[in-house]
Amino acid sequence: MTRASVLPLALAILAGASHVTSQEVDTSERGVLSAGAAHVAAYQRQLTSILADELSTQEIVAQRPHDATMPRGRRLRSEVFFMFAPATREWMAIRDVLEADGTPLESRPDLRDALRRLAPREVASAFKEHNSRFNIGRTFRNFNEPTLTLLVLDEEHRRRFSFDRRHVERADGTVLVTIAFTEKDSPTLIRHVDRGRVFSKGELVVEAGTGVIRRTALRGTIEKLRFELTTVYSPDPRLGLWVPSVFTEGYEYGTRFGTDYTSGGFRPDHASRTSARRSDYEKIVCEARYTNFRRFETSVRIK
């Protein structure tokens, strides 16, 4: 056999071996959840004291009644500090807004100095209050951490969820499994100041075998407010990690036409339709993109 005939045969053998390996990956619900939980446990250590640049947009898609004094859109340039606090089992994404709608902010708190002096939870609370003034719309929101949904697979939270394997697919030689989850017990991941627990549900797209999380989606309802938070993860060569690359938020308050006519007990005559359209309604969409991930070299008081 000549060298020319050996090479194609070797390539064929390697291709066959790769095919066999991918077939042996555990795609069962238990196997994928176990791999995903192990990945999240390691990730909580890896994505801590990490800085990234964030470019975010907000848009009021619909609003009733319309507020002419309120901007319909906003664009923010920020620096974000990511970390996981083991004592409280929570993720934090602390934003330092540098620029709003193209205008640099000259009077703002110093994120680096605050992280050196205070515990991260104190810093997060102070910066959330400071940054809330940049939110547009009437809908209050303060749980916009892109890594929040990873808590579904955290060792302290996982027992409160039920899971269901929904879909298995192959993408770029990797087997991806979609796992749906439903929160069924307290304490819930999101809590309302007045109403208490907020039960959520959503999906995780997980690499079978490695447990790497590729995408998360979290949905829930707080009285008349419906929300959905989606995070897409991408590989970062500098850190050697899959990091949040795109984070989208959707908030919808009220109903599109003020009243659900299909629910019964309401007659959709002309007068009632007119009244219904005057009821409060708002839909807001936000998107954040992250780049330039790097490690925060100065020590942080992790508690």
Image (cartoon, grey):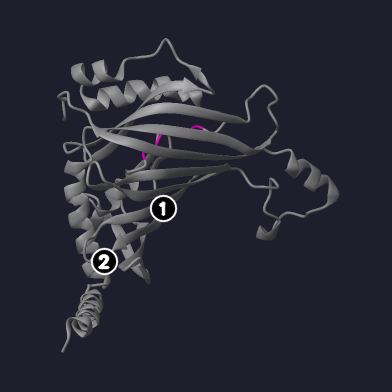
Left or right of 185 in this view: 45: left
Q: Residue at 44% x, 27% y: name it.
A: 77
Q: Tell which circle, 1 or 2, labels the residue nearer the N-terminal end.
A: 2
* Distance between the alpha carbons at the discs numbered 1 and 2: 18 Å
Give the numbered dot on residue 217. 1
Question: Is 143 inside the magenta-drawn segment?
Answer: yes
Magenta part mainly helix, strand or loop?
loop
Q: Quadrant of the C terminus?
A: top left
State the residue position of label 2: 208
Identified by mark 2, the residue type is Ala
Q: Nearer the viewer, residue 14 or 10?
A: 10
Identified by mark 1, the residue type is Ala
Kind of element beneath mark 2: loop
Left or right of 49 in this view: 262: right
Q: Residue at 14% x, 24% y: name it.
A: 299
Residue 50 in the image: above or below residue 206: above
Q: Residue at 31% x, 15% y: name it.
A: 110
Q: Position of residue 239 (x, y in %)?
A: 23, 42
Q: Position of residue 158 (x, y in %)?
A: 24, 55
Residue 170 in the image: above or below residue 20: above
Question: Is 196 inside the magenta-drawn segment?
Answer: no
Residue bounds of the magenta highlight = 140-145
